[in-house]
């Protein structure tokens, strides 16, 4: 089944046609980005620009290209009130009659671009007519998705009922590869940047130490994987289980974690929960965090439910 047919079936089941059309537009934007990525080296689009974004991060040419693709896609849809991008300081007003805000990281993991490692796009859609309505907790999302640009291009999405996994076929159309995806439990594998170990929050230090030792409830010593593109790491966990952590640390007290709430943590948390997993800051369910600003950062711990519960056990000990 291709995405168009999947969305038609949703229409028949009473989903908002404007939202479904918007999702097709978002999917088309990711196909455009996938095509650009394939030829990026040949077009000299790797390396850095001379610009930095609102996060203070150096922009890559493909960050800018992907951002333009997303913003232009949003601008073609009358259903969109605002576009909010990692690459833009402020929200971009789109249509005065729009009812959905599209919040996105157009190209996540872009420091992996120069070495041809999987990167992705992450998207969240919330109901919002006015800019005063943008700072909503993630539980209000009506749609979340990521595209992973790897050996194949994957689109994984949820409308809040289940999680469906599409793969780009030879005709450049998204074809359903797996419906109602559920995260397996029991995969003894964690994903964390261990170079920051000495500054992690103490409960996370204790959890990782115990899982490495294979002590107590841990029946074997854990394995580690870290791509450094959240999309790739989350896609692996969604597929075979395990846990992803970018915890609170002591590096900079003004930054409670590295990842951004509204266009990284929230959409991933919605997908993970819908797939039967869990997502927390260590202290609160991610989807219940009340955003105070668009580019807010938050600690992220997500993956197989039993594993996230183990980490939470160290926080409440
Ligand atoms: P970039 O987009 O700057 O490459 O950052 C990627 C990211 O936001 C997320 O996708 C990764 O999980 C995380 O940062 C990697 O962080 P480290 O640089 O600490 O490995």
Image (cartoon, helix red, strand yellow):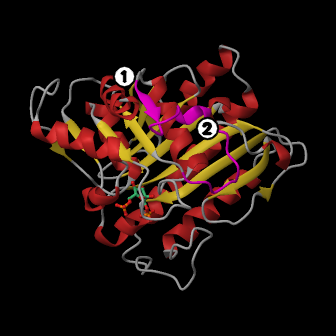
Identified at 70% across, 66% down, the residue is 89
Q: Label 2 crowding class (10 Å Cα cut-off): few <14, some 14-19, many 20+?
A: some
Is residue 270 magenta-colored? no
Quadrant position of residue 65: bottom right
Q: Which mark is residue 182?
A: 1
Q: Quadrant of the C terminus?
A: top left
- Residue 70 lies, in percent from the top left, at 63, 56
Range drawn in magenta: 277-297
Q: Which mark is residue 98?
A: none
Work out which quarter of the rendered image holds the N terminus and state it: top left
Q: Main secondary structure of the magenta part?
A: loop
Label 2 sits on residue: 289
Residue 287 lies in the magenta stretch: yes
Ligand 1 resides in the quarter of the picture at bottom left
Q: Nearer the viewer, residue 237 or 66?
A: 237
Mark 2 secondary-structure assignment: loop
Report the Cα–Cα distance between label 2 and label 1.
24 Å
Asked if disc 2 and disc 1 are in contact, CB closer than 8 Å, the reply is: no
Tell me which label, 2 or 1, sits earlier in the chain. Answer: 1
Q: Residue furthest bottom?
A: 50
Whether residue 172 is visible: no
């Amino acid at each position: 089944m291709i995405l168009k047919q999947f969305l038609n079936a949703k229409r028949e089941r009473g989903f908002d046609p404007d939202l479904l059309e918007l999702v097709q537009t978002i999917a088309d934007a990711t196909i455009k980005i996938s095509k650009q990525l394939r030829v990026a080296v040949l077009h000299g689009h790797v390396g850095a620009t001379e610009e930095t974004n609102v996060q203070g991060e150096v922009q890559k040419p493909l960050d800018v290209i992907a951002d333009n693709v997303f913003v232009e896609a949003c601008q073609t849809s009358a259903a969109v009130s605002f576009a909010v991008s990692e690459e833009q300081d402020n929200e971009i007003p789109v249509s005065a009659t729009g009812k959905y805000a599209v919040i996105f990281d157009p190209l996540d993991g872009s420091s992996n671009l120069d070495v041809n490692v999987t990167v992705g796009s992450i998207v969240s859609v919330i109901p919002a007519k006015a800019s005063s309505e943008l700072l909503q907790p993630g539980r209000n999302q009506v749609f979340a998705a990521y595209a992973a640009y790897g050996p194949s291009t994957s689109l994984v999405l949820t409308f809040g009922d289940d999680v469906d996994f599409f793969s780009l076929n030879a005709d450049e159309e998204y074809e359903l590869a797996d419906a109602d995806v559920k995260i397996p439990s029991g995969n003894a594998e964690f994903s964390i940047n261990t170079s920051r170990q000495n500054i992690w929050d103490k409960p996370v230090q204790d959890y990782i130490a115990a899982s490495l030792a294979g002590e107590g409830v841990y029946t074997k010593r854990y394995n580690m994987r870290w791509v450094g593109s959240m999309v790739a790491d989350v896609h692996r966990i969604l597929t075979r289980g395990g846990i992803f952590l970018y915890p609170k640390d002591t590096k900079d007290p003004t930054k409670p974690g590295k990842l951004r709430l509204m266009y990284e943590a929230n959409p991933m948390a919605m997908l993970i929960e819908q797939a039967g997993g869990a997502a927390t800051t260590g202290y609160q369910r991610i989807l219940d965090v009340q955003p105070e600003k668009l580019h807010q950062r938050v600690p992220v711990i997500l993956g197989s439910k039993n594993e996230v519960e183990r980490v939470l056990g160290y926080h409440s000990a």
